[in-house]
Amino acid sequence: MANAHTNIAIAHEYCKRFPKVPSKTLARKMFNEQPGRFTTFNAAYLCVRKVRGVQGKNLRIAKENRVPWKKRKAGEVPECPPSYADPWEPFVLDVPGRIISLSDLHVPYHSKEAIETAVNFTKRFKPDAVVLNGDILDFYRISRYEKDLSKRSLTEEILVGRDFLCYLRARLGRKIRLIYKLGNHDERWDKFIWQRCAEMFDLDNLQLHNVLHFDKLGIERVGDSMIMVGKLPILHGHELGRSIFNPVNPARGAFLRTKVAILVGHHHQTSSHTESDMYHTEIATFSQGCLSDLTPEYARVNRFNWGFASIDVDKTGEYDLHNYRISNNYKVRST
């Protein structure tokens, strides 16, 4: 019979190595990698829950950094326990110069013509960096929604995604920095691995940036961090939630949520919103259009439009942003 204390020690080590992984996913990995150690999956899951302190008052086990309970002398003041929160640090794109932001391509359900129009503009614009601002791949086959099994397979989606990134790098050359920020569709990959292949989620070859050959193509990965371009923050947009975007347009929704100047994608609409504070400082927010199919099956009737944004940043961090639409005849129009 497996020693309970040894099982807890094993669970403690796994929790230490993978602190952000969901408990069930971690238990499945632990159960598969420790054959014979845990009698059932539920036994492994129970150990993980005990270590993470979610099994009730009488079963909680102190985490490694938790201040242990001890009797205090009269008048002794207890210390505040340490925090397990991770800091949310921005990704600073330190390039005074010119930047292009492309968002929501949803490869392989992209618009080839809209992408080529945006890339042709980018070539003429001669940017120092291109930000791929989320939902570059669609990952339809691993979404949590009902799926049409006649659609492309996951393997095909990955291969087309690789082809697109190779195309983009070839068109732009090696001197332009490529920044790939994860959107909610890109995040489907990690969530799928966690839920379906728990025992393999820590393999380097299964990390999305390795699957898409970022190192080979010279692409920089940004997870859920905000990108700072001078004084302008850029988010994909799903980080701000859904309910605030119902009134007027996405740019106003972004203002209501953040109260700062910001550029977002996610909503497939080109929009802007400007307000002044009590000191008459202008705050302008922007949402950029997409480069995907404009009539996806989940929203045949919509307000989507093709578009992208350009940003000129000076050495002080001040910026000049142009939000472009691409018309139905593939002409670029400034808004």
Image (cartoon, rainbow, N blue to C red):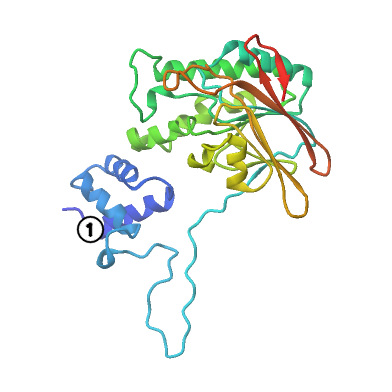
Q: Is residue 173 visible?
A: no
Place of residue 49 in the rendered image (x, y in percent of width and height, measured from the top left):
30, 54
Query: Depth check: 162 or 125 in front?
Result: 125
User: Would you identify the image quadrant in which residue 168 lies?
Assistant: top right
- Quadrant in the rendering for residue 112: top right
* Residue at image coords 70%, 12%: 331
Whole-percent x, y for residue 100 in the image? 71, 27
The amino acid sitting under disc 1 is Ala
Spot the residue most to the top.
Answer: 329
Bin the neighbour count of mark 1 within 10 Å (Cα to Cα): few under 14, some 14-19, many 20 and up. few
Query: Residue extending furthest right?
Result: 315
Farthest front residue in view: 248
Residue located farthest toward the left when viewing the structure as drawn:
1
Q: Is residue 231 above or below residue 328?
A: below
Horizontal side, residue 150 vs residue 166: left or right:
left
The C terminus, quarter of image = top right
Question: Which is more toward the observer, 284 or 317?
Answer: 284
Q: Residue at x 44, y 32 (%)?
A: 188
Name the residue that disc number 1 marks.
Answer: 4
Residue 243 image point, x, y percent: 48, 41
Q: Residue at x 44, y 15 (%)?
A: 156
Name which residue lies at 61% across and 47% down: 258
- Residue 275, given in percent of the width and then of the height, sits at 70, 44
Count the marks: how many? 1
Residue 261, image quadrant: top right
Q: Is residue 141 visible?
A: yes
Secondary structure, mark 1, is helix
Left or right of 156, for residue 57? left
